Image (spheres, rainbow, N blue to C red):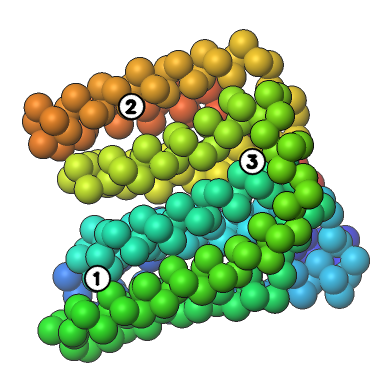
Amino acid sequence: MTKRINPNLLTLLRVVCLPVPCVLLFINSSITKFIAMGLLLFLSLTDYFDGLLARKYNRTSKLGALLDPIADKIFVTTIYLILVKLAYFPFLPVFFLLLREILISFLRSILPQSMKVNLIAKFKTFFQMSLAVGVIFAKTLYPNLNPTLVEILVWIAVLLSYLSALKYILQIMNKLNYIFQKKFQNKLLYEVLCPLLLLLFFPFTESFFWGVPFLTGMLFLKGANKLETDKKEERITLLGFFLLSLAGMLEAILWGKIRFSLLFLLFYLILKEGIKSFNIIKEAFKG
């Protein structure tokens, strides 16, 4: 029986099933919004049960320890950007909140043993998920909910996020030279600057807004990739990303919105990273 229990499946469930409540939130119906809230609550609880099962049945693994915070970041990034799109949350505090997630995700990908999830970080994630569900609930019942109150709550989530990051920063202070070694330059660009550019694109995406959380999730998953990437391949990937990003900037300036460059970027990253992401998921299923 214990062999059949794979905590990594619960972790992946948090990501794979996430599009369902996201789509439901865009339907102008109280019933669908309540269904979305129920699904989000269920998916949020998997964050607790995957760790519980892993400890109870001794199914802990390095991949699982790395996937769990990545799944949390994909979950929070997607939901918060969706709520920005729905005008439930303001963009600026969400940008700073997700910037923290991007930076910590990068550090964890190169220093997994020094960046283990602590109690404050778990409370931070709980608060973020609870805030998202709570605001959806409040806005469903009270459409004219005071936006200033919501903004204050989101800023509190931002403050809590950075406070939880302080412990990580203190833990790695003596490893700064290791982090900024030349071998991590491409990784730093790809896993920090690339998702940062995607976030900056978000206000201009209009109907292609869904591409930003999807692509950001792929970049988060790349941090779980154990395989060494060929330096030439990394440079080609970065060049393609930045050329398409430049096209996106031109679209935003000349057209006021971003569409075609984001679509090309979506196909480009699926071709470049899709197989690697699939392999990570396949390895998690084997876990």
| Left or right: residue 206 compared with residue 200 | left
Residue lying at 28% horizontally and 40% vertically, measured from the top left: 201
Q: Position of residue 280 (x, y in %)?
A: 68, 40
Q: Which mark is residue 88?
A: 1
Q: CA distance from mark 2 to mark 1?
A: 27 Å
Residue lying at 70% horizontally and 76% vertically, measured from the top left: 119
Q: CA distance from mark 3 to mark 2?
A: 21 Å
Q: CA distance from mark 3 to mark 1?
A: 30 Å
| Left or right: residue 159 compared with residue 33 | right
Q: Dot 3 surroundings within 10 Å: few (below 14), some, or many (20 or more)?
A: many
Q: Dot 1 surroundings within 10 Å: few (below 14), some, or many (20 or more)?
A: many
Q: Position of residue 141 (x, y in %)?
A: 22, 88
Q: Secondary structure at mark 2?
A: helix
Q: Position of residue 163 (x, y in %)?
A: 56, 70
Q: Which mark is residue 245?
A: 2
- Given the current orientation, which residue lies at the most extreme bottom position? 141
Residue lying at 75% horizontally and 59% vertically, measured from the top left: 171
Residue lying at 18% horizontally and 85% vertically, measured from the top left: 145
Closer to the chain start, of discs 2 and 1, is 1
Amino acid type shown at disc 2: Ser
Q: Secondary structure at mark 1?
A: loop
